[in-house]
Amino acid sequence: MKKITNYSSVLFLAASILTSGTSAIAQVNCDLTLKTTIEGFKVYKHNPSGAIMYKAKLYIDADGSPRAYGPNNSGLDYTANAGHPGNWWGVVTNSNGNPIIQGSGSPYPGLYVSTTSLMNSAYPSTSTSHYVNSEAIPFFVLPSAVTSLGGIHLGDVGYVYNTSTGLGCYAIFADGGPAGKLGEGSIYLANQIGVNSNARTGGTSAGIIDYIVFPNSGLGQGTIPTVAQINSMGAAKINTVGGTAIVGCLGGGSPPPSGCGTPSSLSANSISQTGATLNWTAVSGASSYNIQYKPSSSSTWTTTSSSSTSKALSGLTASTSYQFHVQAVCSSTGAYSSTSTFTTSSSTSSSSTLTIGNGTSSYSAHPYGTVYMDERVQYIITKSELTTAGWSTSSPYLKSIAFYVSSAASQSMGSFTMTISHISSSSFGSTSFLTGTNTTTVYSGTIAATAGWNTYHFSSSFAYNGTSNLLVSICWNNSSFTSNSTILSNSYSTAVALYYRADVSGGSVCGQSTGTQSYYRPNSKLEFSSSSQLAQFDNGGQRSLEAPLNTDIANETSFEVFPNPFDGNILNGKFSDASDKQMTVNIYDMLGREIFAREIFVEAGNFSLSLSNNDLQPGMYVFIAITNGIRYSKIVVVK
């Protein structure tokens, strides 16, 4: 192989030393050897460290996302990119070779289970959690021609830098790519470095993305690290080659300067229809911070600054998901943090926030018991408590929950997952964790507790039936521990909580069946709304399944559909008032796409809807009917 030195980069780095005096840049050694060329992109080995480096494009890989693929191109990406009948390579198949379809307890019922080469051995192969979620984890894709160069293994960490936007991100090698192709990464990675992340229309074919891959640097097959773990491993490896300025060795753009830390523990509170307050942890030596934010569906960032560790935003759009990240400014600027997401309040729905518990006792065993690596906890909130706090049938949709932290530990919690269920029990009569009905995963991500109210805005609203008690289930897992965060809790006469804690590095206790009964439950705030607010993407834009402004929300008991589940052919319905009327019917899938629309006649309060053309595939759907200015909605299941 030909040994080279990237002289233009050396000159650039020398100029940087003269103008900035940054010692970290002076440590960069651009002793490279050209190893191969793929699609015209040169792949080098960094001789001092063994790192593999190249500049290439970035195509978007949706693999691993629970909503990556589905029947009839119903996922984020074209179904053909996962294969076709008789030859499926990107989704899990059954013994007959047909794609497995997610059921009602999965994140996206009706869609396929998409795969990645890197897997989490703690979950079965048919679970979406077995694979690396393209929307939640930064990862890049490598062909065998690159992995064979320096002993690169699945899970190894790298640094990816966009020479056009100046944004960089630590990432892992999580998926194998076709031979002869180079330059592909996850949806999360693209968002982090300012590339259009749409799996169908996004990415860039320009050779403006720098990739630095560190062989033998990851946790290996069987473990999917959290974003916090990836950042920690990536920062440690990049420091061994002189910092992020190493990208200057590939030429074609100014590297990000080193010497200033990266903000962490990003959060948003005081969220309204048009504003929010952003928060983050302080960076030692920082004199100010740069903040970039944008609608999640946009590729254009708005930049502002702050001299403190918070920033109040205004002029936002209601019912919109936003992303933001933060950069510290010291004597030089550091790298931008990972992004955090929040959603502004709805402009059309009425909401009420109920406070459950007013205790003043500080308690630390759960739900943030980070003196251990892993924790599972369940809470029961009774119907009588909700009614006493002011719950109304006019606001049946639970959209967020908050806990009050009196003292916050620095330890983040990876794979922090929350589900809500209906439950008949009012307390834990034994040490067994409970299983409820209508279980909905409402939140998932990496979080860190902060002092004050910690609010979790749900990714899916929970439709409360108004008669059952609520079962709140939380599980998280880490590979390290520090100390507990303390919360303000009420003490009850019965066991209203059950928890289990353990040190399982790289594992999970989410499947633990028994725990310890607890009489303490956190003070909490629950936000209920008159609307399910299913804001979903449709052809790159947003679709709302909320009622029009001039439409009233019906009492759900005044309308029913049956049978449910049904076979996808005939669905019957009945109104409590036996009148004749015209009705508009719309059926949406769980991604918010309209699948079926029709005007039908209701005779004496009854109707029958024929879908004999097999409009609906097995899965869950939202059935919406509007008649006489009243909106009715039901979740229907096609078996």
Image (cartoon, rainbow, N blue to C red):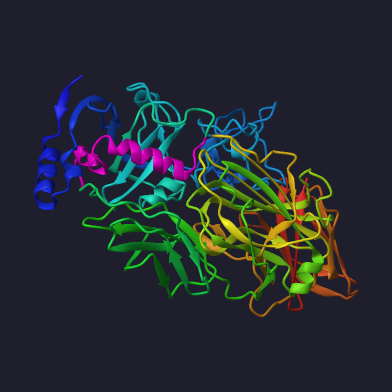
All told, the count of numbered labels is 0
> Magenta stretch mostly in which secondary structure?
helix
Specify whether 229 is left or right of 46. Answer: right
Which of these two is toward me, 53 or 505? Answer: 505
Name, please, the residue furthest toward the front.
361
Query: Would you say residue 456 is visible in this rendering?
Result: yes
> The C terminus is located in which quarter?
top right
Image location (x, y in percent) of residue 355: 68, 70
Name, please, the residue furthest toward the bottom.
550
Image location (x, y in percent) of residue 448: 51, 53
Q: Is residue 570 above or below residue 288?
A: above
Name, please, the residue furthest toward the top.
1
Q: Quadrant of residue 98?
A: top right
233 part of magenta stretch: yes
Q: Is residue 474 above or below residue 292?
A: above
Query: Would you say residue 393 is visible in this rendering?
Result: no
Q: Quadrant of residue 530?
A: bottom right
Q: Which residues are magenta?
A: 224-253
Q: Quadrant of residue 305?
A: bottom left
> The N terminus is located in which quarter?
top left
Specify whether 222 is left or right of 228. Answer: right
Image location (x, y in percent) of residue 202: 41, 49
The residue shown at (63%, 66%) is: 533
Specify whether 388 is left or right of 340. Answer: right
Which of these two is toward me, 171 or 639? Answer: 171
Q: Is residue 31 above or below residue 480?
A: above
Image location (x, y in percent) of residue 199: 47, 47
Which of these two is toward me, 214 or 38? Answer: 214
Specify whether 470 is left or right of 294. Answer: right
104 part of magenta stretch: no
